[in-house]
Every structure is written in structure tokens, then in C-alpha cells.
Image (tube, grey):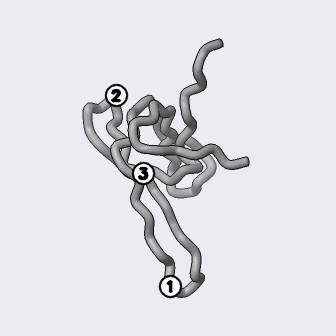
Amino acid sequence: MEEQLKKGDLVHWYEPYADDFAVKDVGTGIILKKISYDVEFSGEKYENFEVFRTKYNDTMRFESRELKKFEKEK
């Protein structure tokens, strides 16, 4: 089951290199908004998230596979 990410969620973000294998940078942030696109040639929806990165005090867009929601402590 894919985890549902939404505005306001505290997340770990992972920035991969172009080869999509090695990780360039990691940090924490807060999701500011969800952006959805319709991909015409495939008929699928594409989503990414604008995240405020606490490490750099800036914003950057990530795909859901590059984000992991913080787990609540029990």
C-alpha cells in the first residue's frame, strides 16, 4: 500500500543523482503543496510535491518515491 502524502506532512526527502541509483542529499521538510499533472500520451496522472527543506531553508519539488513520511512515536 502506497503511503498518502498531503500538505503539512513532515517528511524525509531524498535527492538522487541523475542515474537514479545513488543519493546526492537527504534531509527533512514539510509538504507545502501537491501538484498533479495529466500525462496525455500515457493517460496517467503524475504527482509531485513542493517541500520546504529545513536544511537549506528553501523549497524544492520531489516525487512521492523521494519522500518518506515521519512515523509517529508510540
Neighbours of disc 2 within 10 Å: few (<14), some (14-19), many (20+): few
Residue 68 appears at what percent x and percent y? 57, 37
In the image, residue 55 above or below residue 66: above
Residues 42 and 8: in front is 8
The answer to whether residue 68 is left or right of residue 49 is right
C-alpha separation, residue under disc 3 versus residue under disc 1:
20 Å
Secondary structure beneath label 3 = strand
Residue 28 appears at what percent x and percent y? 44, 29
**Contact? badges 1 and 2 (CB < 8 Å):** no
Q: From the viewer's perspective, is the residue at label 1 or at label 2 nearer?
A: 1
What amino acid type should be assigned to the residue bearing mark 2?
Answer: Lys
Secondary structure beneath label 1 = loop
Q: Which residue is mark 2?
A: 55
Query: Label for residue 20?
Result: none
Residue pictured at 40% horizontal, 32% vertical? 29
Residues 11 and 13: in front is 11
Residue pictured at 36% horizontal, 49% vertical? 33
Q: Residue furthest bottom?
A: 41
In the image, residue 18 above or below residue 45: above
Residue 12 appears at what percent x and percent y? 50, 33
The answer to whether residue 51 is left or right of residue 9 is left
What amino acid type should be assigned to the residue bearing mark 3?
Answer: Phe
Residue pictured at 42% horizontal, 51% vertical? 49
What amino acid type should be assigned to the residue bearing mark 1?
Answer: Glu
> Upstream in the sequence, badge 3 or badge 1?
1
Secondary structure beneath label 2 = loop
Query: Label for residue 49?
Result: 3
Residue pictured at 57% horizontal, 82% vertical? 43
Question: Quadrant of the rendered structure where residue 22 is?
Answer: top right
Question: Quadrant of the rendered structure where residue 8 is?
Answer: top left
Q: Which residue is mark 1?
A: 40
